[in-house]
C-alpha cells in the first residue's frame, strides 16, 4: 500500500462442465501448451499460426470461469502461523463468495494450490525482478517456469508486474516497467497464452498530481508522457485493465468519515462538471479516469486492485474500528457490483480486490497496516460482512434467522428491524434506505403508510433496500438493527417485495 493524496453489472455466471469434459479440456490445453513451448524453441512461425488457431478454438468452447465485474481478495503472506496455500485455496473456493484472488507474490506452490478451484488468479511479480524482465530471454524463462506448468489447471487471469513501482521513484524500476510488461506479453504470445492471460501492474493514487475535484485529475508531470502514456497504449492494444490501489481510509478526515464509508452524507460538489459525489471511492476512481482522459484514453477498464479498511489501530489512529471496517467492505461490495458506476463512469461495475485476506503481523509501520485482514489464521472471520457462502443444505431453524444460520437460497426472505430497535436508529435506517430506493408506499396516501409508526415504515424501507441490492446478508445489517425473516411481513394492500 502507498499513502494516497488526501481529498476532503453485471453478475457473471459460472458454468460447471462435467468431469469428463473437464478432463478433455485439461488434456487438450496441456497439448496446446506443450506444442507452443516446442514451437517456440524451434521458432516455427507457420506452426505457431496453426497453434494460435487451435487455442482460439479451445477458448471459444471452454466454459468461462470468470467474467464481468467480480469480487476478489488480496492474498499476502507476511504473517506467522498461516494455513497452507492449499487450505486457503479450498476455503476461498468452497466457503466464500470471492471469485478471484490476487496473489501478492509468485511462488509456484501457491499458484499450483489454486488448481481446479475455478478462482481467477492474478499473480504479482515483485518489484525487484523488473530490471531482469527487461531482458526478453529472462521474461520467457519466467513464463516457462512460473506459468506454463500450471496454466492448464489453474485459471491464471493476469500477471502483474510489480506493485506501485512508479510511486517508488526508483528510476530503474520506473523506466523498466513498460518494457518488462511488453516482454512478458511477448513471452505469452510465443506460447499462445496471450488471449487468456493479460499483463498489467497496480498503481498507487500517488501517481496523480491532482485529484480534487475529480475532473481535475492528472498524472504527475514527467511520468505522464514518458511512462504512463506508453503503458496505456500497451494496455489498450492488449485489452488489459489499468489497475489502481484506491483507499479512502488514507484520504478521509474526521469530517469526511461518512463520505469515506459510503454512509449518508451531504456529498462533495465538483464545480467543473456540476456532479455530486456521495462517496470518496467514486471521487478517487473518477480522478484516475480524468487523468487517463487527458492523455487521450477513455476506453480502458479500471480495476480496483486494492482497497480496504483496518479493524484495529493504534491509540493515535482515528477512524479505525471493526464496525468501520465492516461498514466499508459491505458497502463497497454493494456499490461496485450495483451497476451504478461513478458520476463520470456511469452504468458500470468494477472488478474489485479487497485488501486483504489475513492480518499480516510481520509488516512494518503503524498498527493499522497489520490489521486489514478479513480472516484469522484459523480461517474464522475477523468480522462478518456477508462474504461467506450460505449453506443451502442447512435447514431453517426459525422464522427469524440468525446470521450464523444461513437460509437456503430457495426460501423467500425479508429484512425487518429487530423488535427492540430504538426510534433514532429506525429513523436513520429509513433515511438511509430511502436515499437509495423507492419509499413512496410509506409516504402519506401510500399503501404502506398505515400504521404510521417508525417500526412499520423502517420494515418496508429496509426490506426494499435488502431486495433491491440482491438479498445479501450484509444488506440487512443496518448497524446491527436488521434481521432476515422467512415470514412475509405484508399486510392488507401493503405488499413487501421478496
Image (cartoon, rainbow, N blue to C red):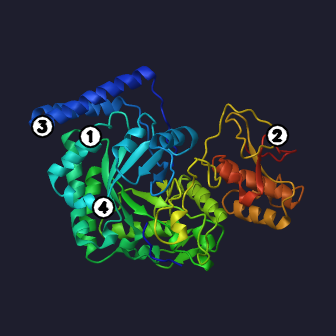
Relative image position of residue 61 (x, y in whole percent): 36, 29
Q: Does dot 2 land on a helix, a strand or a loop?
A: loop
What residue is drawn where x is 42% and y is 69%?
A: 2
Mark 3 surroundings: few (<14), some (14-19) or many (≥20) residues within 10 A: few
Q: How many discs mark residues in the rendered view?
A: 4
Q: Is residue 351 visible?
A: no
Q: Are marks 1 and 4 in contact (CB under 8 Å)?
A: no
- The residue tagged with tag 1: helix, strand or loop? loop
The CA distance from mark 1 to mark 4 is 23 Å
Extreme-top residue of the structure: 20
Residue tagged by mark 2? 399
Residue 89 on image: x %, y %? 48, 41
Q: Which of marks 3 and 1 is in front?
A: 3
> Which one is closest to the eye, mark 1 or mark 4?
4
Residue bearing mark 1: 193
Which residue corresponds to mark 4?
A: 127
- The residue positioned 56% from the left and 43% from the top of the image is 96
Residue 63 on image: x %, y %: 41, 32
Q: Distance between the residues labelled 4 and 3?
A: 28 Å
**Does dot 3 land on a helix, a strand or a loop?**
helix
Label whose residue precedes the other's in the sequence (2 or 1): 1
- Out of 402 and 400, give the one closest to the viewer: 402
Q: How far apart are marks 2 and 1 (CA)?
A: 51 Å
Report crowding for label 4: few under 14, some 14 to 19, many 20 or more residues within 10 A (C-alpha).
Answer: some
Snapshot quadrant of residue 435: bottom right
In the image, 265: left or right of 308? right
- Distance from Cα at disc 2 to Cα at disc 3: 65 Å
Counting residues from the start of the chain, the first of labels 2 and 3 encountered is 3
Seen in the image, is 57 located left or right of residue 290?
left
In three-dimensional space, the C-alpha distance between marks 2 and 4, rounded to whole angstroms, equals: 54 Å
Q: Name the residue under label 3.
A: 41
Amino acid at each position: 500500500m502507498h499513502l494516497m493524496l488526501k481529498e476532503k453489472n453485471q453478475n457473471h455466471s459460472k458454468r460447471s462442465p462435467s468431469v469428463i469434459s473437464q478432463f478433455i479440456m485439461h488434456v487438450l490445453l496441456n497439448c496446446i501448451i506443450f506444442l507452443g513451448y516446442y514451437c517456440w524453441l524451434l521458432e516455427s512461425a507457420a506452426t505457431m499460426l496453426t497453434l494460435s488457431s487451435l487455442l482460439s478454438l479451445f477458448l471459444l468452447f471452454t466454459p468461462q470461469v470468470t467474467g464481468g465485474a467480480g469480487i476478489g481478495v488480496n492474498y499476502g503472506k507476511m504473517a506467522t502461523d498461516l494455513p497452507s496455500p492449499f487450505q486457503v485455496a479450498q476455503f476461498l473456493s468452497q466457503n466464500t463468495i470471492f471469485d478471484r484472488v490476487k496473489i501478492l507474490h509468485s511462488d509456484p506452490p501457491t499458484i499450483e494450490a489454486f488448481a481446479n478451484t475455478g478462482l481467477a488468479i492474478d499473480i504479482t511479480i515483485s518489484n525487484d525482478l523488473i530490471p531482469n524482465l527487461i531482458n526478453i530471454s529472462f521474461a520467457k524463462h519466467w513464463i516457462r517456469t512460473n506459468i506454463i506448468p500450471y496454466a492448464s489447471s489453474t485459471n491464471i487471469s493476469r500477471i502483474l508486474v510489480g506493485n506501485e513501482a512508479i510511486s517508488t521513484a526508483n528510476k530503474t524500476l520506473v523506466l523498466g516497467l513498460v518494457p518488462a510488461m511488453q516482454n512478458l506479453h511477448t513471452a505469452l504470445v510465443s506460447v499462445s497464452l496471450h488471449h487468456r492471460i493479460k499483463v498489467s501492474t497496480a498503481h498507487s493514487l500517488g501517481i496523480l498530481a491532482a485529484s480534487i475535484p475529480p475532473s481535475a485529475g492528472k498524472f504527475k508531470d514527467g511520468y505522464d508522457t514518458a511512462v504512463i502514456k506508453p503503458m496505456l497504449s500497451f494496455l489498450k492494444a492488449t485489452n488489459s485493465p489499468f489497475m489502481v490501489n484506491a483507499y479512502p481510509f488514507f484520504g478521509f478526515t474526521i469530517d469526511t468519515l461518512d463520505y469515506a464509508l459510503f454512509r449518508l452524507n451531504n456529498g462533495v460538489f465538483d464545480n467543473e462538471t456540476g456532479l455530486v459525489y456521495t462517496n470518496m471511492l467514486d471521487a478517487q476512481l473518477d480522478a484516475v479516469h480524468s487523468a487517463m482522459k487527458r492523455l487521450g484514453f477513455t476506453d480502458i477498464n479500471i480495476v480496483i486492485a486494492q482497497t480496504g479498511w483496518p479493524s484495529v489501530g493504534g491509540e493515535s489512529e482515528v477512524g479505525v474500528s471493526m464496525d468501520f471496517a465492516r461498514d466499508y467492505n459491505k458497502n463497497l461490495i454493494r456499490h461496485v457490483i450495483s451497476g451504478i458506476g461513478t458520476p463520470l463512469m456511469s452504468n458500470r461495475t468494477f472488478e474489485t480486490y479487497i485488501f486483504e485476506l489475513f492480518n499480516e503481523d510481520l509488516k512494518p509501520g503503524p498498527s493499522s497496516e497489520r490489521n486489514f485482514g478479513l480472516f484469522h489464521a484459523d480461517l474464522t472471520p475477523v468480522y462478518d460482512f456477508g462474504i461467506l457462502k450460505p449453506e443451502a443444505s442447512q435447514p431453517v431453524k426459525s422464522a427469524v434467522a440468525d446470521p450464523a444460520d444461513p437460509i437456503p437460497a430457495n426460501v423467500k426472505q425479508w429484512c425487518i428491524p429487530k423488535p427492540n430497535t430504538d426510534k433514532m436508529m429506525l429513523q436513520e435506517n429509513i433515511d438511509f434506505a430511502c436515499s437509495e430506493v423507492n419509499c413512496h408506499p410509506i409516504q402519506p396516501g401510500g399503501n404502506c403508510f398505515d400504521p404510521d409508526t417508525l417500526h412499520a415504515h423502517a420494515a418496508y424501507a429496509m426490506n426494499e433496500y435488502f431486495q433491491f441490492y440482491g438479498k445479501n446478508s450484509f444488506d440487512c445489517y443496518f448497524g446491527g438493527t436488521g434481521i432476515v425473516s422467512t415470514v412475509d411481513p405484508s399486510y392488507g394492500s401493503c405488499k413487501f417485495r421478496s
